Image (tube, rainbow, N blue to C red):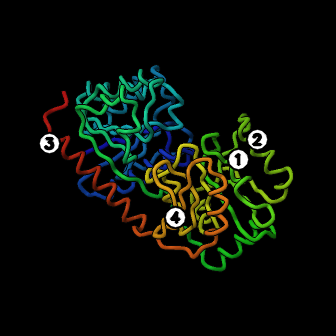
Amino acid sequence: MRVMLVTGSYPPDPCGVGDYTASLHRHLAADPLLEVAVLTTCRGAPASREDDRARVFRSMRGWSVTQTMRFVRALREWSPDIVHVQYPTQGYAGEWLPALIPRLSRLLGKHVVQTWHEPYSRSSVGRLLMQATVSGGLVVVRPDYRALLHPWLRWALLGKRFRYVRSASTLPASTLDASGRDALKQRLLHGQQRLIVFFGFIYPHKRVEQLFEIANPASDHIVIAGALDPDSEYVASIRRLATTAPWNGKATLLGFLPARDVASLLAVADAVVLPFQFGGGDWNTSIHAAVAEQAFVLTTSRTVVGYDTARNVYFAVPDDLEDMRTALARYAGAPRARSAIPREDAWKVIAAEHIVLYRELLADESPQ
């Protein structure tokens, strides 16, 4: 069985869905009965070697409809049985070809699987119509995905092999020993007592500015790891908060870091604060990554409130700053608890669930 994963972004590109795809790619390739490749954007990074079982084709020069024949050639040359498209990714850049790929793949005789990492809104109904009218497999990473879709859009789930598959950390495990962790933490603290960390994209809906209201400048040093878009007014506002009283000298913006460096940062944090506007949950690989490094995580949720002892995670209602301040004061620096499911075992389960879906589709009648 041959599976081609399609994604606009793939490491080292900064993209959460790209990181997810890379983890899935690696664990699918461990199955000796499966050949798996990735089709992604050409970014100057080398493709994998010819003898690699987990191939990476950096063939796409973009994702506008003018690149349609490039996609068709890639499909004909490698000839997968299944085309598995990931939505959305940074690399698609809002272009229309990704929405057409399921239909094109079916016309070329391929089975199709789609993973929808985010719910669709009515403003996206055009793209959703193109994707949803193609039968095949549909994977979602949010357990309440049906409820999150507007009632007028729930027809999009009909006629498909629908699967909820939970997510997991996409970061490698930190390799720092005790002395290395202590040295890194002391270097980042700049004389403060607690290290408060945010990592990920710096967008308004991530509510990064709330760290400066939740943390305490008398004791805390804030570290923010994420790409710093020079054209973003929101990033500029975060810079201003980090360089003016009371946080001047007590906040550091590290920019985009390699995955292993992010894992080490999480391994030394007294608290990882992720105050998402719309709430987090099991679909957030960032929460899984922090839990895997045994950090205390302060985040938000629209369905769960309170402290999860097993995972060392506190869930607050979005924008409830007082509750988040109280939780930070109580739990930051708490004893680090081991993740119940090691990240490699979690990804083995995720890959196995995908393989079951692929085999079910191949057992169906021809897609043509």
Which quarter of the rendered picture does the C terminus lie within? top left
Q: Earlier in the sequence, mark 4 or mark 1?
A: 1
Query: Percent position (x, y) of residue 76?
Result: 30, 31
Left or right of 23? Residue 181 is: right
Query: Percent position (x, y) of residue 167?
Result: 41, 53
Q: Earlier in the sequence, mark 2 or mark 4?
A: 2
CB-based contact (under 8 Å), mark 3 and mark 2: no
The one of 328 and 339 positioned closer to us in this rendering: 328
CB-based contact (under 8 Å), mark 1 and mark 2: yes
| Secondary structure state at the residue bearing disc 1 | helix
| Secondary structure state at the residue bearing disc 4 | strand
Mark carried by residue 363:
3
> Marks 4/1: CA distance?
23 Å
Mark carried by residue 209:
1
- Disc 2 marks which residue? 237
Mark carried by residue 307:
4
